[in-house]
Image (cartoon, rainbow, N blue to C red):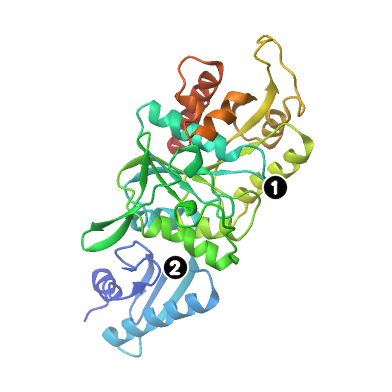
């Protein structure tokens, strides 16, 4: 066989990228740099940056080329780890291919209302006509079944092209999956990190989400195994960080933003949301009491160069709406529903701006 570009690519079409389950030519991972008589130089990308994975790929490339073109062929093969952005695009084709935007909702610490914000953001998007799904990835404190009044519901199984898959529960037109559907409500979930990460992964890889405009992921508070497993499994389009204005919460929110900026993660921060920004009593609707401090998350977002999506006041009705399983955003013409609707508008605007850049 003659040492030509098309022949070389034809031979390399037999070399598989193990994580993507595709050959390296189809996956566009090969760059032929120089072809001379008796030698070929090329660069190959792989998803796994580990030395052993790169070495295996180098050996596979050399073996296949020398098998076809002769043992005397000089093969100079540089194997490099795929950039995070390119890896996300490749994985997107395999996991959740019909979901347009996948967004994680995070918080540095617990108790700042992250799940409440997620539920109302999902509700507001659905109310605006978008197709929405929510994954309750807060393994140790799942709250979405309560917030959407589906505590007693259980996902069914669905046959998709001969493969059994989990069919999410639907409430208010929103598709939901939560670890709370698979455990008893009053029992503590006592799992080590790898077990929790595996359960989370199955909610993406073994579930049929279908076509969605937005899939929101309610993460556990903090930074840990589950967050790392998520970014390694799911091609996130962005993340939101929720905080209250108080200094203790802001310190942890700063860590949350910095986590997504790490070179090993590199997920764009869509914006920051300030929850419990002020308290307004029903009998004094014009008054604002800044119980937890004023504009803390707003100022932090500005200081870190992160978009600020809005402030949500501390209102008793939000808590009551969550407890009865009907997110407050579904109320009509109330100050709190209008605040969430404005948040949804800014969120969509920011996601679209990210996609355009």
Q: Can residue 13 be seen in this view?
A: yes
Q: How many labels does the image show?
A: 2
Residue 103 in view, yes or no: no
Nearest the eye: 183 or 304 = 183
The residue identified by callout 2 is 46
Asked if residue 60 is positioned above or below residue 345 in the image, the reply reads below
Q: What residue lies at 39% left-to-right and 26% top-to-bottom?
A: 127
Residue 258's x, y, as percent?
A: 66, 47
Relative horizontal placement of residue 234, taking residue 21 as reference (left or right)? right
Quadrant of the image occupied by residue 67: bottom left
Number of other residues with Cα within 10 Å of mark 2, as a class: few under 14, some 14 to 19, many 20 or more: many
The tag earlier along the polypeptide, 1 or 2, is 2
Q: What secondary structure is found at the residue carrying circle 1?
A: helix
Instruction: Give x and y (percent) for residue 19.
Output: 40, 68
Q: Disc 1 to disc 2, how far (Cα)? A: 30 Å
* Residue 266, above or below 330: below
Q: Position of residue 208 (x, y in %)?
A: 32, 52
**Depicted 352 relative to depicted 205: above or below:** above
Residue 71 falls in which quadrant of the image? Answer: bottom left
Do callouts 1 and 2 mark residues in contact (Cβ within 8 Å)? no
- Label drawn at residue 9: none
Quarter that holds the N terminus: bottom left
Q: In this view, does 49 lie to the left or right of 93?
A: right
Which one is in front in this view, the residue at disc 1 or the one at disc 2? 1
Badge 1: how crowded within 10 Å, few (<14), some, or many (20+)? Answer: some
Left or right: where does residue 243 sit relative to residue 196? Answer: right
Per the image, label 2 sits on a secondary structure element best described as: strand
Residue at x 60% of width, y 49% of height:
260
Q: Which of 356 and 173 is in front in this view?
A: 173
The label on residue 255 is 1
């Amino acid at each position: 066989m003659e040492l030509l570009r098309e022949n070389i690519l034809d031979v390399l079409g037999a070399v598989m990228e193990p994580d993507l389950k595709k050959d390296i030519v189809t996956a566009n991972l090969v760059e032929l740099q120089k072809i001379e008589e008796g030698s070929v130089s090329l660069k190959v990308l792989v998803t796994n940056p580990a030395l052993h994975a790169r070495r295996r790929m180098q050996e596979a490339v050399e073996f296949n080329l020398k098998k076809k073109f002769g043992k005397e062929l000089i093969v100079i093969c540089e194997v490099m780890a795929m950039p995070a952005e390119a890896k996300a695009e490749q994985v997107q084709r395999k996991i959740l291919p019909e979901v347009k935007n996948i967004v994680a909702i995070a918080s540095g610490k617990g108790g700042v209302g992250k799940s409440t914000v997620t539920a109302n953001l999902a509700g507001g998007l659905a109310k605006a006509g978008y197709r929405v799904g929510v994954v309750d990835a807060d393994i140790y404190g799942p709250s979405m079944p309560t917030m959407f009044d589906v505590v007693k519901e259980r996902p069914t199984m669905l046959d998709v092209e001969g493969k059994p898959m989990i069919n999410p529960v639907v409430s208010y037109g929103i598709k939901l999956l939560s670890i709370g559907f698979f455990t008893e409500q009053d029992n503590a979930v006592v799992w080590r990190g790898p077990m929790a990460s595996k359960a989370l992964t199955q909610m993406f890889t073994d579930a049929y989400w279908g076509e969605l405009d937005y899939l929101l992921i309610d993460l556990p508070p903090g930074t840990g195994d589950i967050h790392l497993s998520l970014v390694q499994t799911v091609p996130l389009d962005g993340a939101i960080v929720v905080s209250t204005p108080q200094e203790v919460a802001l310190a942890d929110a700063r860590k949350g933003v910095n986590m997504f900026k790490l070179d090993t993660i590199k997920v764009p921060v869509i914006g920051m949301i300030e929850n419990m920004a002020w308290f307004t009593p029903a009998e004094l609707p014009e008054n604002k009491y800044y119980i937890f401090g004023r504009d803390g998350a707003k100022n932090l977002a500005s200081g870190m160069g992160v978009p600020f999506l809005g402030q949500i006041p501390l209102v008793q009705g939000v808590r009551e709406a969550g407890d009865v399983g009907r997110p407050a955003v579904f109320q009509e013409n109330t100050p709190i529903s209008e605040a969430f609707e404005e948040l949804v508008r800014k969120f969509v605007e920011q996601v679209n701006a990210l996609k355009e850049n």
